[in-house]
Image (spheres, rainbow, N blue to C red):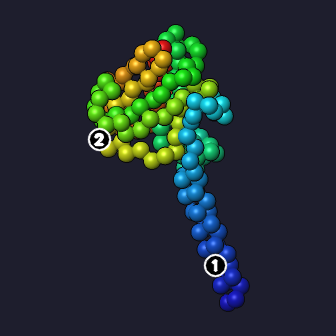
Amino acid sequence: MKIITFVLAVLLFSVLFSCEKEESEEQKDNTSSSLSAKSHNIGQNCMNCHIKGEEGEGWFKIAGSVYNSTQTVPYITATVELRTVQSGGGILVKSVEVDQKGNFYTTNPIDFGSGLYVSVVGGISTQYMSSKVINGTCNYCHDSSKRIWTE
């Protein structure tokens, strides 16, 4: 009986510990910055690794890559904005800087509600997405044939 109780206690502890680890991994602040160069895999779908149960550091709520107007070189001084109204209008829900490798990402919570509009603010122009997004898996749709860009 003591052995069974001990085994059950160990199993319970391991379940509680693993859940605590997963929760803390989700909550860890991992947000891109214009000064950071720690990201990788530009142009790839970040959510392939940065989601629950995968190996990426933190669970991204929005992530992607930004290129210059030729769509061949990473654009490193942009900001990605999520707004409630098209063409940069309405309330700014979230703003994320693009890092030194052209990537943007955050693990911070984002309430997409019924959808948000994306603006990519560059040095001399802003590009607007005309349709709403309901999640932040940007490079899933914006692959090598239809990249996110600004100038």
Q: What residue type is labelled 1?
A: Leu
Q: How crowded is mark 1: few (under 14 residues within 10 Å), some or many (20 or more)?
A: few
Circle on res. 114: 2
Q: Looking at the image, which residue is at 37% across and 39% down? A: 93
Which mark is in front, 2 or 1? 2
Q: Looking at the image, which residue is at 61% across and 59% down? A: 21
Q: Height in image: 63 above or below 129?
A: below
Q: Which amino acid does label 2 sit on?
A: Ser
Q: Is residue 144 visible?
A: no
Disc 2 to disc 1, how far (Cα)?
A: 44 Å
- Position of residue 31 in the picture relative to residue 93 (left or right): right
What is the quadrant of the N terminus in the image? bottom right
Could you say where residue 146 lies in the image, as x and y percent from the top left? 46, 18
User: Looking at the rendering, which quadrant does residue 3 occupy?
Assistant: bottom right
Q: Looking at the image, which residue is at 52% across and 31% down? A: 97
Q: What element carries label 1?
A: helix
Circle on res. 8: 1
Q: Is residue 122 visible?
A: yes
- Position of residue 136 in the picture relative to residue 34 (left or right): left
User: Looking at the rendering, which quadrant does residue 55 occupy?
Assistant: top right
- Position of residue 95 in the picture relative to residue 43 (left or right): left
Camera-side residue of 32 and 6: 32
Could you say where residue 130 lies in the image, as x and y percent from the top left? 31, 23
Camera-side residue of 26 and 49: 26
Camera-side residue of 127 and 137: 127
Q: What element carries label 2?
A: loop
- The reply to whether callout 2 and callout 1 are in contact (CB within 8 Å) is no
